[in-house]
Image: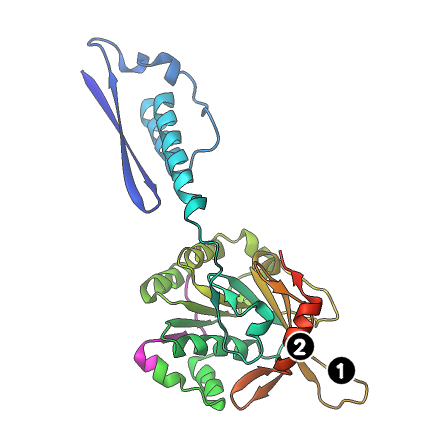
């Protein structure tokens, strides 16, 4: 007679089925079949995926021991999954960049933020982080891209009023379906992921992550990592606003700074002793796959939004002082 063991493994969004057939002589006790292969309960390796391990654990519970033949087969499927996942031949060498539309900024990052990046927009209070992020979404909407703004501390009405102040017709994009705003949101991780998968945005803003989760533990947060996986898989460009207690003069970094693909630091300070009004500053402190200069630039709040000062001189300064961010 024959005993058929059916093992299912989900890899790369495809359902693969493995059928193992073990011949058993009539009258032989099933517990003695494949003695050498079922003798030990210890796995033959430690590189199986979580799905494969769950299959082995279920088999062990039902049959009393692990089956080495099944384990070898699952390992082979894992190897196929690994080869599919890391296919260097199909990787594009070109870096697609997403323009922010903010006057004078894209020149600082080789024409835009690399597509699919998660960038930390951080700094002290009242320095333009939310305005910069909304302006980033506006550029996407103007190019017929769907965008989402998740706010954890401001109502939708307040965000829209801020946009109207700069003449941005946010209401039009809301009506046309290019923008979704979730204000003062108490959404769960599962709900956020469902919204992203349903709406299919190209740009997302989170404001602020300090409200959503403990920023000091974010690298260990399974909830945030699940969101990151969806964003990365779908190549969504994301700005994540975080908060700092100190300005550029104090080198203060949190876990998200290390986790993020880029860091844009916002600050305001008196540039000279006789100054009465503080100047607003932005510094690109990190941007993977991009040459940056790590020099703070002054910006202003114009009638149309944020504008980086002296854009004509950026190229010369950039060429003299650039560094490669890793």
Dot 2 alpha-carbon crowd within 10 angstroms: few under 14, some 14 to 19, many 20 or more:
many
Tell me: 264 left or right of 185. Answer: right
The residues bearing labels 2 and 1 have C-alpha atoms spaced at a distance of: 12 Å
Q: Which mark is residue 297?
A: 2
Residue at disc 1, secondary structure = loop
Residue 115, image x, y percentages: 47, 63
What residue appears at the point 34 percent right and 61 percent down from the top-left corner? 197
Residue 101 visible from this viewpoint: yes
Tell me: 262 left or right of 318. Answer: left
Residue, far top? 27
Segment colored magenta: 174-188
Tell me: 174 left or right of 46. Answer: left
What residue appears at the point 20 percent right and 18 percent down from the top-left corner? 2
Single out the mark in the foreground, 2 or 1: 2
Query: Is 13 part of what is drawn in magenta?
Result: no
Q: Disc 2 or 1, which lies upstream in sequence?
A: 1
Query: Is 186 part of what is drawn in magenta?
Result: yes
Quarter containing the N terminus: top left
Residue holding disc 1: 271
Query: Which corner quadrant of the image does residue 155 belong to?
Result: bottom left
């Amino acid at each position: 007679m024959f005993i058929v063991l059916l093992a299912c493994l989900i890899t790369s969004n495809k359902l693969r089925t493995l059928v193992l057939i073990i011949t058993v002589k009539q009258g032989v006790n099933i517990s003695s079949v494949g003695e050498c292969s079922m003798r030990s309960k210890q796995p033959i390796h430690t590189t199986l995926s979580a799905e494969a391990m769950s299959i082995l654990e279920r088999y062990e519970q039902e049959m009393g021991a692990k089956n080495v033949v099944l384990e070898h087969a699952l390992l082979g499927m894992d190897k196929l999954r690994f080869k599919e996942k890391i296919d260097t031949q199909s990787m594009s060498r070109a870096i697609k960049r997403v323009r922010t539309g903010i006057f004078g900024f894209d020149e600082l990052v080789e024409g835009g933020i690399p597509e699919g990046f998660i960038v930390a927009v951080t700094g002290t209070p009242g320095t333009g982080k939310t305005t910069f992020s909304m302006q980033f979404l506006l550029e996407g909407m103007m190019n017929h891209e769907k965008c989402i703004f998740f706010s954890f501390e401001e109502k939708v009405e307040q965000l829209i009023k801020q946009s109207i102040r700069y003449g941005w017709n946010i209401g039009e994009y809301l009506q046309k379906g290019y923008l979704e705003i979730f204000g003062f949101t108490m959404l769960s991780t599962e709900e956020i992921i469902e919204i992203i998968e349903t709406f299919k945005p190209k740009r997302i803003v989170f404001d602020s992550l300090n409200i959503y989760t403990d920023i000091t533990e974010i690298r260990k947060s399974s909830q945030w990592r699940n969101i990151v996986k969806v964003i990365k898989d779908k190549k969504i460009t994301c700005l994540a606003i975080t908060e700092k207690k100190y300005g550029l003069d104090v080198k203060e970094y949190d876990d998200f700074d290390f986790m993020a693909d880029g860091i844009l630091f916002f600050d305001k300070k008196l540039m000279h002793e006789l100054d009465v009004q503080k100047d607003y500053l932005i510094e690109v402190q990190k941007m993977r796959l991009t040459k940056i200069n790590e020099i703070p630039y002054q910006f202003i709040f114009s009638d149309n939004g944020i504008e980086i000062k002296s854009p004509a001189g950026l190229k010369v300064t950039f060429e003299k002082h650039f560094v490669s961010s890793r």
